[in-house]
Image: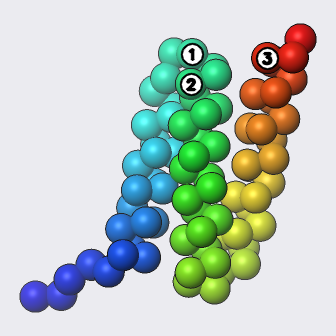
């Protein structure tokens, strides 16, 4: 029986957080949970040396941070 390593669990956790974020009624909760998932995907992408995963999720992190701060500042 093959065991799942820590890096794979990280990918599964990131996927679950991103998926769960889309059922949030509050846009702030959606963005925050999605932000955490995207950060985990950045770490996951670095761990598996997949730059497309890292770059796409860094962009998502930046968008979420921007809107979270913009919404809270204004």
From mark 3 to mark 1, how far is it between C-alphas? 13 Å
From mark 3 to mark 2, how far is it between C-alphas? 13 Å
Please state, as top left, top right, bottom left or bottom right, where the C terminus lies in the image: top right
Dot label at residue 54: none
- The extreme front residue here reads 73
- Judge the density around disc 1: few (<14), some (14-19), many (≥20) Cα neighbours within 10 Å: few
Secondary element under disc 3, as helix, strand or loop, is helix
Secondary element under disc 1, as helix, strand or loop, is loop
Question: Which image quadrant is residue 32 in?
Answer: top right
Horizontal relation, residue 18 to residue 70: left or right: left
Dot label at residue 26: 1
Q: Is residue 67 above or below residue 33?
A: above
- Judge the density around disc 3: few (<14), some (14-19), many (≥20) Cα neighbours within 10 Å: few
Label 2, on which residue?
29
The first of marks 3 and 1 along the sequence is 1
Residue 42: x, y in percent? 64, 65
Horizontal relation, residue 19 to residue 56: left or right: left
Please state, as top left, top right, bottom left or bottom right, where the N terminus lies in the image: bottom left
Label 3, on which residue?
72
From mark 2 to mark 1, how far is it between C-alphas? 5 Å
Q: Nearer the viewer, residue 59 or 6?
A: 6
3 or 1: mark nearer the eye = 3
Horizontal relation, residue 21 to residue 74: left or right: left
Q: Is residue 3 above or below residue 9?
A: below
Question: Which image quadrant is residue 27 in?
Answer: top right
Residue 9: x, y in percent? 36, 68
Residue 63: x, y in percent? 80, 41
């Amino acid at each position: 029986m093959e065991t799942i390593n820590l890096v794979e669990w990280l990918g599964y956790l990131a996927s679950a957080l991103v998926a769960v974020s889309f059922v949030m009624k509050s846009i702030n909760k959606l963005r925050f949970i999605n932000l955490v998932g995207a950060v985990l995907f950045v770490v996951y992408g670095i761990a598996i040396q997949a730059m497309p995963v890292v770059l796409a999720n860094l962009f998502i992190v930046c968008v979420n941070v921007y809107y979270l701060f913009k919404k809270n500042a204004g």
